[in-house]
Each structure stands twice: as C-alpha cells, then as structure tokens.
Amino acid sequence: MQSGVLYSAEERDYKTSFSYFYEAFEGYGSIGDKINATGALKYMILCKIMLNETEQVPAMLSTKEVLPYNTSPRIVAIRAMADAFRKRSLKDFMKALEEHKKELVEDKVVAVHSQNLERTMLEKEISRVIEPYSEIELSYIARVIGMTVPPTEKAIARMILDKKLMGSIDQHGDTVVIYPKAGATKQFTRALTTIRELTKTVDVSYSRTKVIK
C-alpha cells in the first residue's frame, strides 16, 4: 500500500495509485485484515476524487466485496467528501471536513492533497453557480459561495487562465461573462491578456485588504 501512497503524493499519478490501493485492498481482505483493507479502500476513493471520477464511487461501494466496510468511520468520512465533490457543493465539502476531522483533516495522506482538494472544490462550486448564466455579477457569486469578492475574483481569473472557464471578467460592470461554445475561442484568446493583468491587480488589492484588517 506504501507504493500507492508514494505515487499519489509525489507523482500525482492517481490511476496508478488506485491500482496499488486496489491490489492492497484485495490482499488485506483475503487474509482478513479488515483495518488495513479499510485504509486501502479509503485511499481508493480518494484517488477517484482526485481523478474527478466521483460518479463511480456509489457503484464501487455497492459491490459485494466492499459492502462490509461501508459503515467504517473512515469510509463514511471519505464518502461524504466524494458526495460533496459530485454535487459540486463547497458547503458540503467544508461540512465533511468539520464532521470528520480525524479521518480527513488529520489523515496525513489526505492532508497532502488538501490544498488541491480545496482549490478544486472551490472551482466546482463556482462552475455550479455560473452554469445557468451568460453573464453574472461577481458579488452574487461571492455571496452564494460564502466568500468576499476579491478572492472570488482571483479564483475565477485563475480558472480562465487555466482554461477551465471560457469567459472574461468585465471590470466596468463587475460581472463575469461566459462565452457560448460557438466562437468562444477568439473571444477567450483576446481576454487572456486582460485576465493576466487583472490577476496581478487582484493579488495586490487582496494583500492590501489583509494588511488593513
């Protein structure tokens, strides 16, 4: 199982990690080592979260070989995290961390990925909020996800730069404009330079705000 931990922590190769954890799960299960088998299963689910394949988790947990482990606090905890990812709910994600602190926050393997997990969850929540709109106010997005405008704006700018969101930030109207799929590429390309400059400005403004507080 150590191989799976190393691949996930150092290489970020979650498919290979999943294979190692699955092999460990089968091995421990065959000799009746329920404690280590449960740990391997927990990290199998973590890999699915990191691979953005949480829709596969319910089916995985309903298989005959896995059912005996479903009531373990470790599996209940990581399943709550997977459910939050699948629903793209930042609120449910933070609730899972709060209610299952021992199994999620204090777990060293999960903690290694905590920054990426929180960033990914924030992006999923933003995507969920803006999905129905072609243009939406930054203040509304911030209010819905429970953050102030500067870090929300920074996160959206990062998503645009990473090409996870096809759109731009309208500085005059303080809105996010989402491009339709058809013809989005040209608009998106033109927006990138503006977004890069905006990101620098937001970083400075946010830092000043923190100093004032």
Image (cartoon, rainbow, N blue to C red):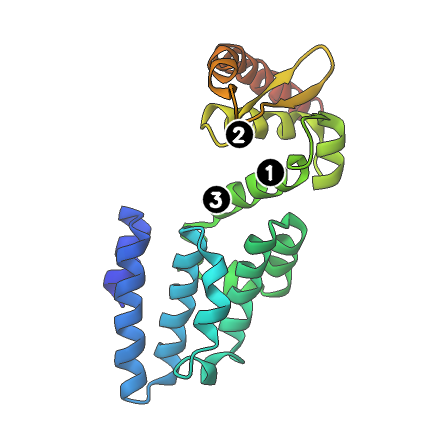
In this rendering, position of residue 130 left or right of residue 106 = right
Secondary-structure class at tag 1: helix
Which is more toward the observer, 45 or 149?
45
Looking at the rendered structure, the secondary structure element under dot 3 is helix
Q: Earlier in the sequence, mark 1 or mark 2?
A: 1
Q: Position of residue 86 (x, y in %)?
A: 56, 55
Query: From this viewpoint, which residue is outermost toward the left?
Result: 3
Q: What residue is pinned by disc 3?
A: 115
Identify the amino acid type marked 1.
Answer: Ser
Kind of residue at disc 2: Leu
Q: Is residue 182 depicted above or below 10 in this figure? A: above
Instruction: Name the foreground residue: 160 vs 121.
Output: 160
Q: Is residue 59 left or right of residue 156?
A: left
Question: Alpha carbon of mark 2 to alpha carbon of mark 3: how far?
Answer: 20 Å
| Quadrant (top left/top right/bottom left/bottom right) for the N terminus | bottom left
Task: State the CA–CA distance, disc 1 to disc 2.
Answer: 8 Å
Callout 1 environment at 10 Å: few (<14), some (14 to 19), or many (20+)?
Answer: some
Quadrant of the rendered image containing residue 38: bottom left
* Earlier sequence position, callout 1 versus callout 3: 3
Q: Look at the numbered discs 1 and 2 and tell me whether their residues touch, using CB distance below 8 Å.
A: yes
* Residue to which mark 1 is pinned: 127
Name the kind of residue labelled 3 in the image.
Gln
Residue drawn at point x = 51 percent, y = 43 percent: 120
Residue 59 position, x and y percent, is: 47, 70
Residue lying at 30% horizontally and 55% vertically, measured from the top left: 15
Crowd tier of the residue under label 3, counting other residues whose Cα lies within 10 Å: few below 14, some 14–19, many 20 or above: few
